[in-house]
């Protein structure tokens, strides 16, 4: 089918050095985001990459793979990655307002607001000045999140509109919640 085939004009190899900004299984999907000076992106993770030790947020890596435009899949397929050491997380951009959200996909962002509730899927609903922000906290047990309800918090994480119908902020650990 057309959705499974790559477009013939769009298959090239790439090599990138950047920091891993998020790496986890979210809602039954393995997600890996990387960011360099040009921006951030969701990358496809080939199974052999994670058979030994998964990449972690904050690692500075050199990744190689292929760019292949396929409907419904991230274009960057990482085939190998070498950890070069610890990297520095990018300076966060402000959480995007609804008009700029397409330009912010995959970027490291920051939001501040009051946590209103914990959703059934384990995400927090944060009310920011421009509206609601759905926040996924890696490794946080749902029961441990109760302390954030009605609290003013600042969170840093990766912005994505492609995980669920509504935009989400993917936070790599509780270290990025203040």
Image (cartoon, grey):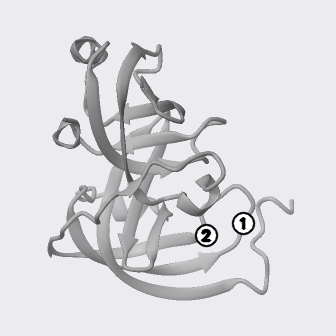
User: Looking at the rendering, in which quadrant would you find the N terminus?
Assistant: bottom right
Q: Is residue 50 left or right of residue 103?
A: left
Name which residue lies at 30% across and 40% down.
Answer: 155
Q: Nearer the viewer, residue 178 or 122?
A: 178
Q: Neighbour class for label 1 at 10 Å: few (<14), some, many (≥20)?
A: some
Residue located farthest toward the front when viewing the structure as drawn = 129
Residue 135 at x, y percent in the picture: 41, 33
Question: Disc 1 and disc 2: Cα gap in Å?
Answer: 7 Å
Residue 119 at x, y percent in the picture: 46, 16
Q: Nearer the viewer, residue 97 or 61?
A: 97
Name which residue lies at 32% across and 75% down.
Answer: 18
Q: Vertically, is 22 above or below 63?
A: above
SS assignment at label 1 = loop
Q: Is residue 3 left or right of residue 156?
A: right
Q: Quadrant of residue 82?
A: bottom left
Mark linked to residue 75: 2
> Which residue corresponds to mark 1?
70
Q: Quadrant of residue 146?
A: top left
Q: Vertically, is 122 above or below 80?
A: above
Q: Vertically, is 164 above or below 31?
A: above
The reply to whether dot 1 and dot 2 touch (C-beta < 8 Å) is yes
């Amino acid at each position: 089918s057309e959705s499974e085939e790559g477009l013939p004009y769009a298959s090239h190899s790439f090599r990138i050095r950047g920091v891993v900004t998020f790496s986890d299984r979210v809602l039954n999907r393995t997600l890996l985001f990387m960011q360099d000076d040009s921006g951030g992106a969701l990358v496809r993770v080939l199974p052999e990459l994670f058979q030994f030790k998964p990449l972690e947020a904050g690692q500075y890596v050199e990744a190689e793979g292929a760019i292949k435009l396929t409907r419904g899949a991230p274009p960057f397929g990482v085939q190998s990655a070498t950890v070069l050491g610890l990297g520095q997380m990018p300076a966060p951009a402000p959480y995007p307002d609804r008009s700029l959200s397409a330009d912010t996909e995959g970027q490291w962002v920051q939001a501040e607001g009051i946590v209103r509730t914990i959703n059934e899927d384990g995400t927090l609903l944060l009310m920011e000045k421009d509206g609601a922000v759905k926040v996924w906290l890696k490794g946080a047990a749902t029961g441990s999140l109760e302390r954030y309800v009605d609290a003013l918090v600042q969170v840093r994480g990766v912005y994505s509109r492609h995980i669920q119908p509504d935009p989400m902020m993917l936070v790599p650990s509780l270290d990025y919640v203040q």
